[in-house]
């Protein structure tokens, strides 16, 4: 299955100049820039929960390391 990059996702990604960005899927600009990955993840989780989106946390090499579902999960757990 392919990871969604549409507006129903948020991503924590490494920034070319250093630090970490939080981006909404498909957005050209970051919604936040942080010095540390942990700061970016904390901010992204809060935004993702508020907007009920999927959260994709990337490694330094750009690959997805972790995913969190804060709504819109296509395969929610049963009962």
Image: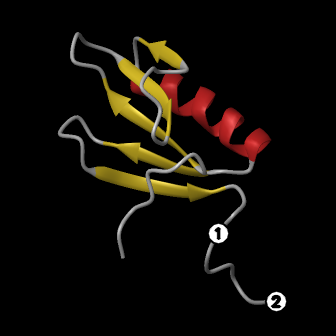
Which quadrant of the rendered structure holds the N terminus?
A: bottom left
Q: Residue 29: give x, y in percent of width and height.
A: 45, 20
Q: Name the residue under label 2.
A: 79
Q: In which quarter of the image is residue 70?
A: bottom right
Q: Earlier in the sequence, mark 1 or mark 2?
A: 1
- Report whether 29 appears left or right of 59: right
- Determine whether the residue tagged by mark 1 lies in a helix, strand or loop: loop
Q: Residue 32: give x, y in percent of width and height.
A: 53, 17
- Report whether 59 appears left or right of 11: left
Label 2, residues with CA under 10 Å away: few <14, some 14-19, many ≥20: few
Of residues 54 and 37, the one drawn nearer to the viewer in this rendering = 54
In this picture, is 20 found above or below 51?
above
- Report whether 31 appears left or right of 56: right
View extreme (right): residue: 79
Mark 1 and mark 2: Cα distance apart in space: 14 Å
Of residues 51 and 64, the one drawn nearer to the viewer in this rendering = 51
In this picture, is 25 found above or below 27?
below
In this picture, is 60 found above or below 32?
below
Q: Mark 1 points at which residue?
A: 73
Please give the name of the residue rendered at 35% of the width and 68% of the height, measured from the top-left corner.
2
Q: Residue 10: give x, y in percent of width and height.
A: 54, 41
Please give the name of the residue rendered at 82% of the width and 89% of the height, measured from the top-left corner.
79
């Amino acid at each position: 299955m392919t990871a969604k990059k549409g507006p129903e996702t948020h991503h924590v990604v490494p920034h070319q100049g250093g630090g970490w960005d939080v981006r909404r899927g498909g957005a050209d600009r970051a919604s936040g820039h942080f010095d540390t990955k942990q700061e970016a993840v904390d901010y992204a989780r809060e935004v993702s929960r508020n907007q009920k989106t999927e959260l994709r946390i990337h490694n330094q090499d750009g690959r997805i390391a972790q995913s969190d579902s804060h709504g819109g999960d296509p395969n929610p757990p049963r009962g």
